[in-house]
Image: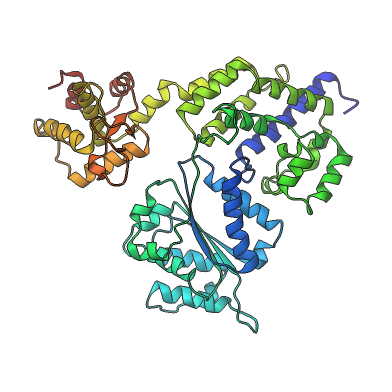
Amino acid sequence: MDDQNPTQSALHNMKLIKKYLKIKIMEDNISFTGRKYEREHVYDLIARSVLHGESHSALIIGPRGSGKTTLLNWVLHQVSNKVDLVNDAYLIKLNGLIHHDDKLAFKYITAQMRLESAVGDRVFGSFAEKLSFILQCLTSGADRQCKTIVFILEEFDMFCHGAHRQTLLYNLFNITHTNKAPVCVLGITSHLNVMELLDKRVKSRFSHRNIFIYSNETEVGAECPVTNYKEKLVQSLSMPLSLAKKDMSEKRRGRKSTVNMDEQMEVDGEIQFCIPDVILTKCKTDKRQFQHLDSSFLEDWNAHIQSLANDQKILDSLEKLYHFTGNEQTFKDILFQTVSKLLPNKPYIDTTELCNAIDSAVCSEHRVKLLQSLSILELSLVIAMVHGMAIFDGQPMNFEMVLHRYTKFANTNSSNQSVPRPVVLKAFEHLELLQIITPSKNAPHSSEDACTSSVQKEYKLYALSASVDDVKQAIASYRALPTEISHWFNNSID
């Protein structure tokens, strides 16, 4: 590095910093900060199952992008520092979008446990017999004990549907009440009302332990609601100074086996900016290449990131992003785009560019694209809601009101095919999932929350989150949109 001219040195530093930050932003799925209570709760469940042979079940519930899977990966990484999860436990991961069928789920369970040869061509009478046979194959020793089995069920709500309704869930939860084997069943879902989907027999076996994670939840003691985004900005873009200190990195690498991640953060404030070694190994990246970074440049870089986090323009943009979405992936995409634009002649992040990147993520163009991605039926329901809210002076509407207006339009247009009511209801629920319509908590002339479970879903009140201008722009540029639907939107309301 000493024989390089300043231009070559700056180019080399920038390449390494961009590479390191890109890996941290997009590939690091085990670093998790904040939400101390939730982390301790999940850690306690898994640790007690693996270390003490207890059986537990729980659901991790929260919107998409709120960090549910990352939290769980962080906990598994912490537990692996105390025990050998590969040899002391079985980690079974299933996804409701893929393994919704019981036969397919059983096939993947045996494959992850490496018991295909033991199962062979055996014929079982029920799914319960299949699980019992697996547990018998796993028992060993004089006391016939079995290693802990940790089931991770992604898209948990999808397991509630299928030909054999909730058979897998019932048998997994049932095992937690027996002494056959220590089992920990953790479900991950973005369906906030998932408990309403469970059958009574499944609920009777479930522990009813729900861990909620909300996207824009403000940490206790935070001065402002954008504190979480501000901390994530610093965490994601700061560089660990230890990379440029060979002797210090060796000491910390030897200390890592005896000190957990939280303790390291307390001992060394900048160790939290490091990428875990397991992530670098997964990305096939040698950590030693970053030791050639200039330590003075890293210090200047971190000071620059701190100044960005305290810049009022960026704080205003982060607040706008905070109110628009809580999806962490959106925030990571913004940071990734910003880092990718760094050049040797422009080695620092420009405040205006970062603000523009955040503004472009929350501008109406993205909402228009979301509306354009809807089906004809879903867009028709949005139009029916636009007309209905115009008639009722912006008051929220329920499904029955929207269905009435849509049916009135469909009946007057012979080219429109009649759509069954359950299909229309499913399309309406999809609009809620996309947050195009949002539940109204302040229903007029009502003394209770319209979003409570005591109100049937057909009569819950919703407000349209998309503006009329966005809907108008989406319809104007919507390809293959039937002419009568366009006329319906533009014609006078009756």
Q: Quadrant of residue 455?
A: top left
Coloring scheme used? rainbow
Tell me the quadrant of the picture where the N terminus can be found: top right
Q: x, y (%) of residue 150?
A: 56, 62
Question: Residue at image x 28%, y 46%?
Answer: 454
Callout count? 0
Q: Quadrant of residue 52?
A: bottom right
Q: Nearer the viewer, residue 46 or 254?
A: 46
Q: x, y (%) of residue 95?
A: 46, 55
Q: Nearer the viewer, residue 12 or 456?
A: 456
Question: Residue at image x 65%, y 84%?
Answer: 142
Q: x, y (%) of residue 432?
A: 33, 37
Horizontal placement of 14 versus 76: left or right? right
In the picture shown, does residue 44 fall above or below 396?
below
Horizontal placement of 316 versus 477: left or right? right
- The extreme bottom residue here reads 142
Question: Residue at image x 47%, y 27%?
Answer: 323
Q: Nearer the viewer, residue 482 or 435?
A: 435
Tell me the quadrant of the picture where the C terminus can be found: top left
Q: Is residue 90 visible?
A: yes
Q: Is residue 286 visible?
A: no
Question: Residue at image x 45%, y 41%?
Answer: 63
Q: x, y (%) of residue 48?
A: 61, 63
